[in-house]
Image (cartoon, rainbow, N blue to C red):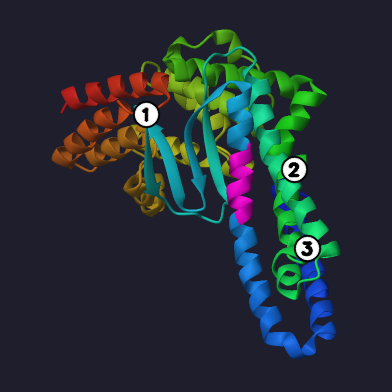
Amino acid sequence: MGKNKFKLLLNISLALACSALFILLLLGVISAYVSELLTILLSALVGLIAVYLANAILHETGHLIAGLLSGLEFYSIKFLFVVVTKENGELKLSFSKSLGELGFTTLIPKTDKGVFKKYVISACGGLGASLVLILIQVIICLASKSLIVYTAIGITFPLTVYFFMVNMLPAFENNDGYLAYKYISGGEDSVIIGNYFKAVAQLYSGVEPSQLDSTLLVRYSGVGGYSANIRYLRYLAYVKNDEERALKELREISDLSEISNINDEIFEELFFSAILMDDKRFIKANEDQALAVFENPCRPQTYRIHASYRIWSGEKDWAKLILKSGISYCEKYPVKGISKSESKYMQILLNNL
């Protein structure tokens, strides 16, 4: 059984088990209070929605508090579709598609010293917050004498258990539990992840990919997990000045079924490589997906790739506008090293038009 199939099967199994437990608890309440059926069903529905929101807020807040205490800096936090970002010392509110996830928290390292440990602490903060919510719900389930409270908050604890397990089990890879497990267990994977976070810290401080400490990018294992992240950084280090070496690195992580946490970034660069090689077949086959990505750029690379696509398709005036927007976007993008590198690349493209 492949890795992705196993993760899908595990996810479905957890969802079914937690759903079955909730249904059993709900049927137990209904059988005991048949005359209150409408109240029970409404309470359960409202409770599921409330607990879903509580999971999103508490889990991400746990990440944030633990991360700040460990020495990381706040950049953004997302609860479902609500995003709060800190730009130039000011908090800004925006909205984004949820895509099924509870949210995310972006924290910036001040230094590369102990940065892996700091992200692990932040990860454990999210798990700890979810565990506290489970305990509160279980206590209510066992002790509450209020039918509405028991139904809305008590018996809905399986939903929180599901979210906790998905975030905690290392088998899902790249989640909170995976990060903590790899840090505690040590070994080659721990070194690779530690090197990656150190490299990320350098990028945040303003070091361009091509100027990263080379010792951080020489160790990787296979094509998935954080090894893919390392090879992606190697690709970015080469892409502006050595396309042949860059494309060689990209080919090693071109199987998107093996990659999860940087899947979007790799797809974009595969599309970019197809433009460089004038691979009309690949471009036409993936054009719709790429255009959907271009509609909502969230990193400088997207502007560079979108502009390159417009240049390839003969829309040079449109490409100029994209490049100017991309260069402007780089001024506020928090990963300063990426911003510097991509801004220079886009300026070169703009000068050549």
Residue 19 appears left or right of 319: right
User: Label 3 neighbourhood size at 10 Å, few (<14), some (14-19), many (20+)?
Assistant: many
Q: Disc 2 or 1, which lies upstream in sequence? A: 2
Amino acid type shown at disc 2: Met
Q: What range of the chain is rendered magenta? A: 54-62
Amino acid type shown at disc 1: Tyr
Whole-number angstrom distance, CA of label 2 to CA of label 1: 30 Å
Q: Compare residues 137 and 20 and report the one nearer the observer.
A: 137
| Residue 165 x %, y % | 76, 49
209 w.r.t. 48: above or below: above
Q: Which structural element holds mark 1?
A: loop
Q: Residue at x 79, y 25 (%)?
A: 184
Q: Which structural element holds mark 2?
A: helix
Q: Which structural element holds mark 3?
A: helix
Q: Compare residues 297 and 135 and report the one nearer the observer.
A: 135
User: Label 2 neighbourhood size at 10 Å, few (<14), some (14-19), many (20+)?
Assistant: many
| Residue 242 x %, y % | 40, 17
Q: Are marks 2 and 1 in contact (CB under 8 Å)?
A: no
Whole-number angstrom distance, CA of label 2 to CA of label 3: 15 Å
Residue 278 appears left or right of 52: left
Q: Are marks 1 and 3 in contact (CB under 8 Å)?
A: no
72 w.r.t. 172: above or below: above
Amino acid type shown at disc 3: Cys
47 w.r.t. 282: above or below: below
Q: Residue at x 61, y 62 (%)?
A: 50
| Residue 187 x %, y % | 79, 20
- Residue under label 2, please give it: 168
- Residue under label 3, please give it: 18
